[in-house]
Image (tube, grey):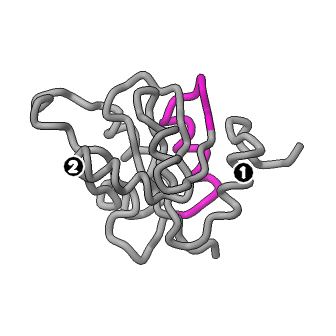
Amino acid sequence: MLKNIPPIISPELLSVLNEMGHGDRICIGDGNFPGASMADAEGAILVRADGHGVPELLDAILQLIPLDEYVDTPAMVMQVAPKDKGLKVPIVDEYKKIVAKYDERGEKAFGEYERFEFYDEAKKCYCILQSGETAIYANIILQKGVVK
């Protein structure tokens, strides 16, 4: 056991976060996200976090790594598709509150990718963390910053 490591962080995830360098990205996918096929597409590491929600994982991860200060939007979410316009996605507001605890930019650290652009960017991530999150449009990509 280690001290000060959130218990939701598995040994595998801890190792991946440690291996990631400045500018590397991790995609946290919701339960509907095609994590296995996205990881296979470009050789990303797939880590499973079944039974855990994205907000809890996001909070735990941000206790361990900083967001990249050298890009405007190191936290990217999936834009609601035109077919789903008007659909409320309150989980993103929750993400913004969590990020604000760890990054002074708060809401300004966020950007959006169109759905298929998000998939393309996820394939380029160092790691895809497949959660058990049941909310839709609950996917987020984080870009790691420099640990000081």
> In the rendered image, which residue does mark 2 sit on?
114
Label 2: few (<14), some (14–19) or many (≥20) C-alpha neighbours in 10 Å: some
User: What kind of residue is marked 2?
Assistant: Glu
**Picture residue at 44% right of the left edge, 32% below the top:** 30
Q: Is residue 119 magenta?
A: no
Rendering coords of residue 12 (x, y %) = 73, 46
**Picture residue at 65% right of the left edge, 57% below the top:** 17
User: What kind of residue is marked 1?
Assistant: Leu
Instruction: Check the image and name the residue furthest to the right.
Output: 1
Q: Earlier in the sequence, mark 2 or mark 1?
A: 1
**Picture residue at 35% right of the left edge, 60% below the top:** 109
Quadrant housing residue 50: top right
The dot on residue 113 is none
The dot on residue 14 is 1
Rendering coords of residue 86 (x, y %) = 11, 29
Q: Tell me the magenta residue range.
A: 48-66
Q: Is residue 49 magenta?
A: yes
Instruction: Determine whether the residue tagged by mark 1 lies in a helix, strand or loop.
Output: helix
Instruction: Check the image and name the residue furthest to the front.
Output: 41
Instruction: Determine whether the residue tagged by mark 2 lies in a helix, strand or loop.
Output: loop
Rendering coords of residue 123 (x, y %) = 43, 53
Reply above or below: 26 against 56.
Answer: below
CA separation in Å, label 2 and label 1: 29 Å
Camera-side residue of 77 and 59:
77
Quadrant housing residue 79: top left
Reply above or below: 116 against 108.
Answer: above
Foreground: disc 2 or disc 1: 2
**Picture residue at 40% right of the left edge, 27% below the top:** 32
Question: Quick one: quadrant of the N terminus?
Answer: top right
